[in-house]
Amino acid sequence: MPSPLLVPMSQNTPYIVEMRDISKVYPNGVRANDHVTFAVRPREIHALVGENGAGKSTLMKILYGMERPSSGQIFVRGKPVSIHSPHEAIALGIGMVHQNFMLVPSFTIAENVVLGAEPVRRRLLDYKAAVAITRQLSAQYGLEVDPEAPVEAVPVGMRQRVEILKALYRGADVLILDEPTAVLTPQETHELFTAIRQLVQSGKTVIFISHKLREVKEISDRVSVMRNARLVDTVDTAAVTEEQLARMMVGREVFLHVDKAPLRRGEPVLQVRSLEYVTEAGVETLKGVSFNVHEGEILGVAGVEGNGQTELVEVIAGLRPATAGQVLLCGQDITNASPRQVRQAGVAHIPEDRLTNGAALSMSIAENLIVDRYERPPFTRGGLLQPTAIKENAEWLIEQFAIRAPDGDVPVGSLSGGNMQKVVLARELSAQPKLLIAAQPTRGVDIGASEFIYEQLVRARDNGVAVLLVSADLSEVLSLADRILVMKDGQITAVFDNTPSLTEEEIGYYMLGVKRMSAEAIAARA
Amino acid sequence: MESTIPLSFDRIAARKAVQAERRRSMLIDLGVTLATIIAALLMGFIVIALLGKDPFLAYEALLTGPITRLGRTGRWLELATNLILVGLGVSIAFRARQFSLGGQGQMVAGAIVAALIAIYVPLPPLLGVLIPIAAAMVTGFLLGLLPGVMKAYLRANEIVSTLMLNAIVLRLYDYVLTFHLKPEGSATTRSLPVQPTAQLPTFYELFGVDLGRFNLGVILVVLGAIGVWLLLERTPFGFAIRAIGANEQFARYGGIDTRRVIMLAFAAGGAVSALAGVHLLLGVHRRLFLDFVGNIGWDGITVALLARNNPLLVPLSGLFYAYLLVGGDRVEQQAQVGSELVQVIQAVIILLITAQVLGDWIRARRARTQAEG
Ligand SMILES: Nc1ncnc2c1ncn2[C@@H]1O[C@H](COP(=O)(O)OP(=O)(O)OP(=O)(O)O)[C@@H](O)[C@H]1O
Ligand SMILES: [Mg+2]
């Protein structure tokens, strides 16, 4: 496959990609890009940052041919181009990995990598060649995958590497990564960064979108900041601090440290007893988990993703049946109750996978915001829905959570990735539950919103709510939780009181299975 | 909650832009629908001309057929009433994304049960009409409940189960009619007429305007459209139906008892579809005979799809579709164009309207020109 890199740069341009004066108005009237000029040098790592809904994904979708700009010009290697489809973008050597993955879950990794440009032998997919290609690319760029495993069976980190390999296989020279780290654990992020550096070494250019400024500082050469559909500035990363970047993005200081009132721990609200869960495929993912969450405390669950946290949350929430064990809420047995009964017992749940479970993309924001409470006053009175109450609730929450939407009537599907998340957060945080389960609550939202969500979680705790916080972000767990529980291979391997002396390293040993507390110590503290 | 995140975003301006766009979008939709109808008619025109028939004659028949003679107007309105009632029923299940094809069976079953009362039980005026209607609705409800339960609790595919039920009900209808309702010694296979108090009076009987068999059953259309709209848009049950239709996993996670709602959506749809059967019985034919419902159960599905399952648009699409059917009959008679060709033209029109492409395309163009300013 000839690499487009061999195509000589025409003219004397320092840029491999240049987008000039790009504007985009979506068909519903939303202006997502407003005269944006954005330029990327060859072999650089160029970060693109900005608040939720600032227009980052839109700009990149235009470059990748998925959206057509309303006006403006694009130059690739100095030549004016118009990109009508991803196919044409790929032909120009531009590849993109999306915020929400687009793989075929039942296909193997090798099949996914070659999909769309399959090696063929006698008109059939040459599967052996596909595996060989995947192995070779994987070794060449240090992106480790298991070519013959089906995508649905591998962790998100690997799925992402598959997406990158897929783009590389098609000859991408410029690789757009839209929030690649949002779903990754710190370890996976680290591995991804190593791979990105290797890609640049071998002549590739990377555009990297992230809300985590620490990552932006760590990995990028230059950074462009978008705000309110405009490109505010492009600067050398070395020349700015995280604080300065944050100010450029949101126009004010942002503090991600949390003020908590002293712990006032009350009665246990959630009691989990010897919980076991075996998947339909027969995999044991929870092996006898027991713990309590009390009124007025935040219990943080740390762990490398895929060690049973997802299943734990979904079993408690009634979305999966427990194989054995008990779940009590304020003394009431809710083991294997339906999600409806669990909610009625007083549980709110911010799901980890917000787009599958948390939202209906074709329904309006206002409707999404009441799915757990539409039958109750003030939303239903005398057997009829009350449009005014529904509308007011939406306006209030849109305002509170700064959801970037013109009003409550627009479908959730037309929001930016982070704003979809905020709709789910707004609903669950306003549910006034006894137990609040928050799985990866700040994933995909910008720093301003993260700050607000932290405040809300702490406020719920101070008001006596029991909060179960599951997060792959250790610094998040450390700054919010009163107690921290570590999960490894479906078991609890440690429980800590969150004292100032507790460090990420210490927790890390337990997460990786290097250390493990005795069963008695765990039982005494959980 | 006190603190709010400050937002660098002019919501008022964005709201204005989107609301203006929404208004325009409605106009565009309307314009597009009209344009598609014209385009489809034009295509049919050319086809007829190419086949060597007189397209002007054919089109005159198609476009004016239903309104040039009062009798045909009556036929049009009466047919529309049936299609709309079935369409309304079907749209309820469709909104929950359940492809219930049971309209035909529900109509027939409703008609038999209503007939047993309307033919054999003498009732005072008004009650004579209301009780058969209620009986038909209950029957339709139960007949809808069955595939609903099978889908919700046994995960039986609703397309298969409703089709099977249709077949069973139609056979049963033939049987009951032939061996029980047909009077001894009658030469034709038909029942006795319904009691005079059970008749829905036609407009001729009421006002002397000869609109054929068009009758007071049209009240059911008005009540049905408003009722179904209220049910879907203004009740918690309707909210649950729409949430399930939008994303079933989300509905379940949100605390909706999805199985119960799915089951009841089938049943509610059945109750409404059965109204078409009772209208045929009490207003149009006033007795039962073989092949009493014709194709109405199926055409009603087309009507629901044309209206995109919006109960307020179902009456419009029902009127439109019935117009095409009645006009089509005229074309066959007048212009010697075969019924196949008429059906092809009808199909082209329906296809073009169902495809949303044109409207989306226009909106995208408009957005582009706007941004340049
Ligand atoms: N398909 C669409 N239809 C209408 N509006 C859209 C569509 N996609 C995005 N928008 C709007 O365009 C704006 C910019 O969205 P975009 O997805 O580019 O933001 P983003 O910077 O990627 O945000 P995030 O950090 O939340 O992913 C938002 O206001 C969003 O609501
Ligand atoms: Mg985005």
Image (cartoon, coloured by chain):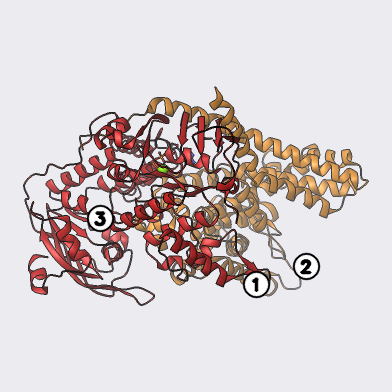
Within 8 Å of ligand 1, the CB of disc 3? no
Residue type beneath disc 1: Val
Percent across and percent down for residue A9 are: 57, 39
Locate residue B92 relative to residue A250 in the image: left or right.
right
Q: Colour of chain A?
A: red
Mark 3 or mark 1, which is nearer to you? 3
Label annotation for residue A471: 3
Q: What is the chain letter for disc 2?
A: B
Q: Quadrant of residue B39?
A: top right
Which quadrant of the rendered structure holds the C terminus of chain A? bottom left
Q: What is the chain letter for disc 1?
A: B
Q: Quadrant of residue B251?
A: bottom left
Q: What is the chain letter for disc 3?
A: A
Q: Residue at x 88, y 40 (%)?
A: B57
Residue type beneath disc 3: Ser
Q: Quadrant of ligand 1?
A: top left
Q: Mark 2 or 1 closer to N-term?
A: 1
Depth check: A373 or B359 in front? B359
**What is the crowding at mark 1: few (fewer than 14 residues within 10 Å), some, or many (at least 20)?**
some
Report the residue marked by disc 2: B188
Label annotation for residue B55: none
Instruction: State whether discs 2 and 1 lie on one chain.
Output: yes
Residue type beneath disc 2: Thr
Depth check: A421 or A492 in front? A492
Locate residue B82 relative to residue B244 in the image: left or right.
right
Report the residue marked by disc 1: B176
> Would you say residue B263 is visible in this rendering?
no
Query: Among all residues in the image, which is located at the extreme top?
Result: B373
Percent across and percent down for residue B250 are: 39, 55
Mark 3 or mark 2, which is nearer to you? 3
Instruction: State whether discs 3 and 2 lie on one chain.
Output: no
